[in-house]
Image: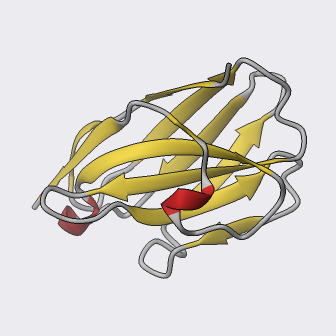
Amino acid sequence: QVRLVESGGGLVQAGGSLRLSCSASGRTFSGYTMGWFRQASGKEREFVALITWSGSLTYYADSVKGRFAISRDIAKNTVYLQMNRLKPEDTAVYYCAARSGVAVATEDYNYANWGQGTPVTVSS
């Protein structure tokens, strides 16, 4: 059974940085694509970034390109989202997700497994 646990969220001032972590367990994730999504209050969940478990492919939403970086540590079974130059509009609950297969999958229905989310608040 796949389990994803996010951590690292919190309150930060605009222009600051945070690093989110997603600890993955329950199976071997070789061949998987791992994604980060976010959902702001009153809005739909939106894609942020993805990485294949091999690390060969990364993809970002235009809104975070150049500010956020996704990475993974195979030894720790952990996926990271480094968020720099944060803006108030980045405020949301951030979710880690996993799907079998390699794909540039930016829609949430493509992901079968989800974490519980970690909140990020960026103050102006």
Residue 20 point in image, percent of width and height: 47, 39
What quarter of the picture does the C terminus occupy? bottom left
Q: Residue at x 22, y 68 (%)?
A: 89
What quarter of the picture does the N terminus occupy? top right
Q: Quadrant of residue 56?
A: bottom right
Q: Residue at x 31, y 53 (%)?
A: 16
Q: Residue at x 66, y 67 (%)?
A: 105
Residue 103 point in image, percent of width and height: 78, 66
Horizontally, is 36 left or right of 95 in the view?
right
Question: Would you place residue 86 above or below residue 104 in this image?
Answer: above
Residue 19 point in image, percent of width and height: 47, 41
Q: Residue at x 65, y 38 (%)?
A: 79
Is 37 or 108 nearer to us in this picture?
108
Is 12 or 106 nearer to us in this picture?
106
Question: Would you place residue 35 above or below residue 78 in this image?
Answer: below
Horizontally, is 29 left or right of 19 in the view?
right
